[in-house]
Amino acid sequence: MIVFCEYVVQEEYRDKYLGWVRSQPERWRNVELAENTAQPGVFVEWQRAGSEQEADNIAKERREGRSGWSEMESWVKRGAAGVRVWIFRPVSGV
């Protein structure tokens, strides 16, 4: 299972957001974070989950802004509603 998260950090908050990211390396353990090269400020995160339940827990934590995630919502375009989270499962036979 993969938990995928996408959001847009408003231009005026990009440096503040990146400073927040760098100041908390433990938050990003096992998380891949990337910024769109053509559209600076568009960020994606993905992380593997060992089970569907674990993926659901990770997604719920992000959607509800728990564990300090809400701190970044003021920098995201549309706030909490702008943080989109999806869960993907592997496709068998490919």
Image: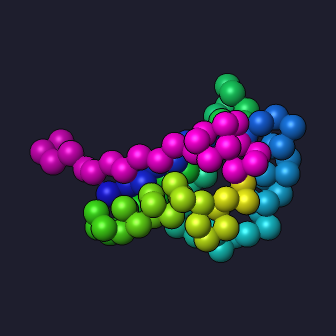
Residue at the extreme top of the image, as rendered:
38
Q: Quadrant of the N terminus?
A: bottom left
Q: Is 22 situated left or right of 82 in this image?
A: right
x and y percentages locating residue 53 in the rendered image: 30, 67
Q: Is 86 situated left or right of 50 in this image?
A: right
The magenta-colored residue range is: 73-94
Q: Quadrant of the C terminus?
A: top left
Residue at the extreme bottom of the image, as rendered:
26
x and y percentages locating residue 88 in the rendered image: 33, 48
Q: Residue at x 52, y 47 (%)?
A: 5
Compare residues 24 and 85 and report the one nearer the observer.
85
Q: Quadrant of residue 60?
A: bottom left
The color scheme shown is rainbow
The answer to if 48 sits in the magenta stretch is no
Q: Residue at x 67, y 31 (%)?
A: 37
Q: Quadrant of residue 71?
A: bottom right
Q: Is 34 situated left or right of 41 in this image?
A: left
Q: Residue at x 42, y 54 (%)?
A: 3
x and y percentages locating residue 46 in the rendered image: 49, 53
Whether residue 10 appears in this view of the structure is yes
Identify whether 27 is placed above or below 21: below
Identify whether 70 is placed above or below 73: below
Residue at the extreme left of the image, as rendered:
93
Whether residue 35 appears in this view of the structure is no
x and y percentages locating residue 22 in the rendered image: 77, 62
Number of dots carrying numbers:
0
Q: Quadrant of residue 64?
A: bottom right
Q: Is 17 situated left or right of 56 in this image?
A: right
Identify whether 36 is placed above or below 73: above
Q: Residue at x 25, y 50 (%)?
A: 90
